[in-house]
């Protein structure tokens, strides 16, 4: 296994990690199927005055993976606002332990007022002095103090590990690995094109994932679900030849054509120019097809390096 460590970071040889993934993680918190900027979530009748925070203390709590008890003084659509001596911040709704057993978005939101004036045992999962933001997790505190550091020390690139899905966002899926959350970016869920991550996993589901990248300095772990399966693009050019016919399922209709998924799970584009038209109705396609339709397609173009597949739609009576 060829790995390298540099300042707490392990990276795979393949350069595939888009830092935009992590920008999304830091700037957005998925709230039961919706994505809202953290700063918007903190703009409510309850405000956080971060000027009173002892940032050195907060950083020590984070670095030592310590558990701290804080008082809940407010809430908003994103979660709870908590405070203690020289420290305060935000607990996302997805990091509250009781929320994992509540499926209804409405019930989750209705349960937030019940936390007011209670105390929670929490861990710091993000401490960003420059952005004046501290994010806490009740769920991470369940595994005990120091376990995050122990887990980071045991993880390696290409390891397979079992975790539990904790949150699903438009850009990917968060998985609890036992005190640390990793992210399966939407591009790592399937070898095919993914439009809705919720079609692949469910909150609370235990899944097996591969570790792609580890950065202990900022607590980020990149994961993959699709890499547990053979890459179909490796063999697609061996299995298919230009001109071959094969069954497929329509997945998406666009103004320029449609996408269809082959049996191997990869998708190709049926450009509108590759769709048969009736002489009496030149607009017959793509109006004649809908997502979910089983069709027959013709292989027109294969580009395994760019993962591109050009298809033609075979007209059926």
Image (cartoon, rainbow, N blue to C red):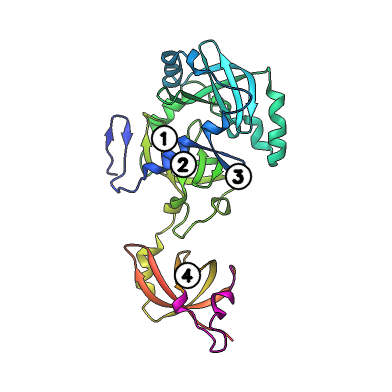
Q: Badges 1 and 2: C-beta atoms under 8 Å apart? A: yes
Q: Disc 1 or 4, which lies upstream in sequence?
A: 1
Residue marked by disc 2: 183
Mark 2 or mark 4: which comes first in sequence? Answer: 2
Q: CA distance from mark 2 to mark 4?
A: 33 Å
- Give the number of the disc on residue 33: 3
Q: Earlier in the sequence, mark 3 or mark 2?
A: 3
Q: Residue 220 shows which numbered tag?
A: 1
CA gap between label 1 and label 2 equals 8 Å
Examine the image and state in which quarter residue 150 appears.
top left
Q: CA distance from mark 1 to mark 4?
A: 38 Å
Q: Position of residue 296 (x, y in %)?
A: 51, 78
Task: Between label 1 and label 4, give the one nearer the viewer.
Answer: 4
The CA distance from mark 4 to mark 3 is 29 Å
Comparing 175 with 207, the one in front is: 175
Q: CA distance from mark 3 to mark 2?
A: 16 Å
Looking at marks 4 and 3 on the same chain, the residue that comes earlier in the sequence is marked by 3
Residue 116 picture quarter: top right
C-alpha separation, residue under disc 3 versus residue under disc 1:
22 Å
Classify mark 1: residues with Cα within 10 Å, few (<14), some (14-19) or many (20+): some
């Amino acid at each position: 296994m060829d790995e390298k460590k540099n300042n707490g970071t392990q990276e795979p040889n393949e350069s595939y990690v888009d830092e935009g993934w992590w920008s999304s993680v830091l700037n957005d918190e998925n709230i039961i199927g919706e994505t809202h900027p953290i700063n918007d979530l903190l703009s409510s009748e309850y405000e956080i005055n971060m000027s009173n925070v002892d940032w050195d203390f907060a950083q020590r709590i984070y670095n030592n993976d310590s558990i701290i008890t804080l008082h809940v003084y407010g809430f908003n659509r994103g979660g709870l606002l908590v405070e203690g001596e020289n420290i305060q911040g935000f607990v996302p709704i997805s990091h509250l332990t009781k929320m994992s057993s509540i499926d209804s978005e409405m019930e989750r939101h209705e349960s937030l007022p019940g936390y007011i004036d209670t105390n929670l045992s929490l861990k710091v999962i993000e401490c960003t002095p420059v952005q004046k933001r501290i994010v806490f997790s009740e769920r991470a505190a369940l595994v005990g103090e120091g376990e995050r550091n122990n887990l980071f020390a045991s993880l390696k690139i290409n390891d397979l590990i079992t975790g539990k899905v904790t949150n699903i966002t438009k850009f990917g899926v968060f998985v609890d690995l036992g005190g640390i959350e990793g992210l399966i970016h939407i591009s790592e869920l399937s070898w095919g094109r993914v439009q809705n991550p919720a079609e692949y996993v469910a909150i609370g589901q235990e899944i097996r994932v591969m570790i792609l990248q580890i950065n202990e300095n900022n607590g980020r772990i990149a994961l993959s679900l699709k890499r547990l399966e053979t890459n179909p693009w490796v063999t697609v050019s061996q299995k298919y030849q230009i001109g071959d016919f094969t069954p497929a399922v329509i997945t998406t209709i666009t103004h320029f054509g449609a996408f269809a998924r082959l049996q191997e799970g990869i998708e190709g584009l049926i450009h509108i120019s590759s769709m048969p038209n009736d002489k009496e109705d030149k607009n017959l396609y793509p109006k004649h097809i809908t997502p979910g339709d089983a069709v027959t397609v013709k292989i027109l173009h294969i580009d395994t390096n760019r993962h591109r597949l050009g298809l033609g739609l075979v007209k059926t009576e």
